[in-house]
Amino acid sequence: MRYYISDLKDYVGQKVELKGWVYNTRSSGKVKFLELRDGTGIVPCIFFLADCGEAAYGLFDQMSQESSVRVVGVVREHPKRKGEFEIGVSEAELLGKAENYPITPKEHGTDFLMDNRHLWIRSKRQHAILRVRAEIIAAIRDFFDGKGFTLTDAPIFTPAACEGTSNLFETQYFDEKAYLSQSGQLYMEATARAFGKVYCFGPTFRAEKSKTRRHLIEFWMVEPEVAFNDMYDNMELAEQFVEYIVQRVLKNRADELKALERDTSKLSPIIAPFPKLHYKEAVEIILKENPNFIVGDDFGAPDETIVSSKFDKPVFVHHYPAAVKAFYMKEDPKDPGYAMGSDLLATEGYGEMIGGGQREESIETLLRKIKEHGLKEADFAWYLDVRRYGSVPSSGFGLGLERTVAWICGLPHIRETIPFPRLYGRSYP
Ligand code: 4AD
Ligand code: MG
């Protein structure tokens, strides 16, 4: 029988064996305290000579931070903290001693912590963030699976660019060149015409040569695509999705958000529908605070913050100028020059978390756009087939997992949102 700290409430008064790592130790007179961590929680283990005997009592002094240990003892209600437990140790064993564990309770610099990321993930704060991440991943899958979407994952080696050529990762594919996927979208457009409602969820890559708090080189994106949806259906799906994720994390990961000192009153109002602004309306808001903004340009991070600061829910900006958007976006026939796409800007200055829209369904227009964007037509032959054989409108979006984690956890930087971040200038450990 394996016992875990998270289940101790079921074993009060019983003797259990726990295995884990030493989180902390302290002594007070004849009583010695070991805080044991097993990944599911932390529990105080009390070493009292009369109960645990000389051998275990003597071992305590060798149980340095992060040593692995086995402890046997009776589960008791914590004398002061209601709903918490402690172990009255009767037997203990040192499994693997940790000498001079590098991460101590004192402050460490970010570079040091990032170099020790493989160990840093053991600390309370990192642990809470990664548990929230796991909950968001489960929420993403449940949301789409529950709505009848089929998971149709996209390849990572791809022959062509989806999101422009400026940040493509080139790699060798035997005798040919290939690129690491920037987005699974083009493939989802094909699978949507096979299954109707689809999504993919996996790592994507952007060779962004800049250090910002929002950009990773390797990040996870979930990309739904729905045949026959227009850009408005698409925003509706996105707002329901974001509401579902936020409300589920609030419900299931309250302890973790508390450990992160997240102000959850900022998250509880995140209920659909969300405000929706035309690019021109958003520009009016921006110009009041940033008169240097050039109308027609894409928004910079500070511009996004200006817009989102006016709302307590995430806000959609739709109909960006077609010139600043990707080749596949449909231009609005009723609003020439503007694309039928939308970005969702998170609250509290977290910036763009979703990008998406309606896809161009005309093969002639696509051929022209591919040329205009300097892309090679031959690479897109299969994509054009998707139009050639029964073309229909479709819409979809991509939500960046790590930006969502950063936003929900209230983190200042994206680097802590993924177990092993790949950043510009860092691919270790
Ligand atoms: O806006 P993007 O580039 O959209 C696409 O890739 C579309 N093809 C998606 C689609 O319609 N299926 O990226 C989508 C989202 C962004 O809103 C952002 O959350 C995230 O992916 N993202 C990044 N996250 C972390 N680091 C980066 N370098 C990111 N680039 C984009
Ligand atoms: Mg975008």
Image (cartoon, rainbow, N blue to C red):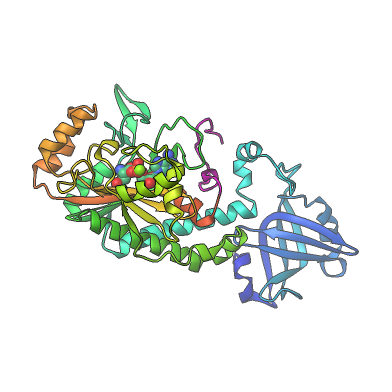
The residue under the point 27% across, 32% down is 160
The residue under the point 45% across, 36% down is 217
Q: Residue furthest bottom?
A: 13
What are the residue bounds of the magenta stretch?
A: 412-429
Q: Nearer the viewer, residue 36 or 106?
A: 106
**Relative to 263, is 56 on the left or the right?**
right
Ligand 1 located in image quadrant:
top left
Quarter of the picture containing the C terminus is: top right
Residue 71: x %, y % from top left: 72, 62
**Relative to 108, is 256 on the left or the right?**
left
The residue under the point 45% across, 45% down is 289
Residue 6: x %, y % from top left: 60, 67
Query: Is residue 267 among what the camera can see?
Result: yes
Q: Nearer the viewer, residue 177 or 262?
A: 262
Q: Residue furthest right?
A: 29
Query: Is residue 153 among what the camera can see?
Result: no
Residue 151: x %, y % from top left: 29, 53
The residue under the point 33% across, 39% down is 295
Residue 359: x %, y % from top left: 20, 46
In which quadrant of the rendered view does residue 254 lie?
bottom right
Rendered view: 379 above or below 89: above
Does residue 332 belong to the magenta stretch?
A: no
Quarter of the picture containing the N terminus is: bottom right
**Relative to 149, is 201 on the left or the right?**
right
